[in-house]
Image: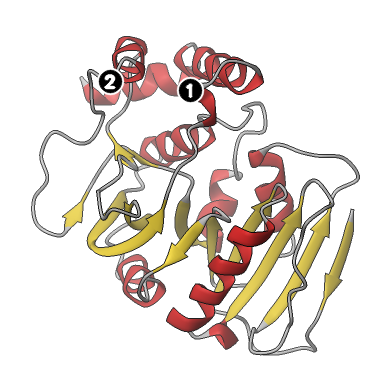
Amino acid sequence: MLATRSATAKPRPLVSVSIVSHGDGEPLRALLTSLSMREPADSIQLIVTDNLKHDLPDISPAGWHSVFVLRPARPRGFAANHNAAFHSATGTFFCVLNPDAVFLESVFSALSHQLDQGEAAIAAPSLVDSQGGLQDSFRRLPSPWELVRRRLGRAALRPESVSGAIIRPDWIAGTFMLMRSETFAQLGGFDERYRLYFEDVDLCTRARLMGLSIVVDSGLRLLHDPRRASRRAGKYLFWHVQSAVRFFTSDVYRRAKGMKG
């Protein structure tokens, strides 16, 4: 793994942002442009993982607190890449972020305030698509039957009740997750036995089992148009089913079901 750093010693960044690129050159350019426009870039440590070693745009260190580019010897999964990025993170907060997201407004200030005030341990904005539609990026604890119904388009796994701007789901999508760095360390990071799916479900479920809470601030928006790879046949569908079986047969899920009852 090759890591390059582009800044001399500075005060600790507010947020370390971990982004994994799988040849996402153009989306990543748009994300970084929007991020630098909406957030104070000099307080952000960028950690970009070039998972496929191609099509990564040149990332100028100008304006950012610091920049790391990680190039693993071979492609790794979602969990392994973000866990490895965390080893380079020096920010007060750690943010897991998809390369195909776009910032529509500042979100770090409000979400980090909620985390500082103890209102939650993991936080996220609402995700909207290019038509302004709200995505199902926050959900209650899934069950095998609900997952089947969801794939058939017959069920939504969002919380049954939403009150005010603050939503308290059982888990949030790994498209955007913000937490204090010590929280990610306390959780032991993502479980690397999962492959692309259910890492976020497992992390949030383990957090709740430890008494930590999760919030979505629906007053904040992040643009994201999902690609839904698992709805096609092939390896993505296989990974989705494999991860679902692992989660639903895990001790984490068994104990979480006990919490629900």
The image's mark for residue 135 is: none
Toward which corner of the image does residue 123 lie, by quadrant? Answer: bottom left
Report which residue position mark 1 lands on. 231
Q: In the rendered view of the protein, which quadrant contains the C terminus? A: top left
Residue 6 image position (x, y, % from top left): 80, 81
Q: Nearer the viewer, residue 237 or 131?
A: 131
Q: Is residue 242 above or below residue 39?
A: above
Task: Look at 66% across and 50% down and name the residue there.
Answer: 82
- Circle 1 crowding by C-alpha within 10 Å: few under 14, some 14–19, many from 20: few
**Regarding mark 2 in the picture, which secondary structure is present there?**
loop
Report which residue position mark 2 lands on. 153
Task: Look at 30% across and 44% down and name the residue there.
Answer: 135
The Cα–Cα distance between marks 2 and 1, rounded to whole angstroms, is: 11 Å
Direction from residue 92 to residue 3 in the image, left or right: right
Toward which corner of the image does residue 137 lie, by quadrant? Answer: top left
Residue 31 image position (x, y, % from top left): 54, 66
Q: Is residue 54 above or below residue 44?
A: above
Disc nearer the start of the sequence (2/1): 2
Residue 101 image position (x, y, % from top left): 48, 58
Q: How many marks?
A: 2
**Regarding mark 1 in the picture, which secondary structure is present there?**
helix
Direction from residue 182 to residue 67 in the image, left or right: right
- Would you say residue 90 is visible in this rendering? no
- Circle 2 crowding by C-alpha within 10 Å: few under 14, some 14–19, many from 20: few
Q: Amino acid at mark 2?
A: Gly
Q: Is residue 123 above or below residue 240?
A: below
Q: Are marks 2 and 1 in contact (CB under 8 Å)?
A: no
Task: Look at 69% across and 65% down and name the residue there.
Answer: 47
Residue 205 image position (x, y, % from top left): 41, 34
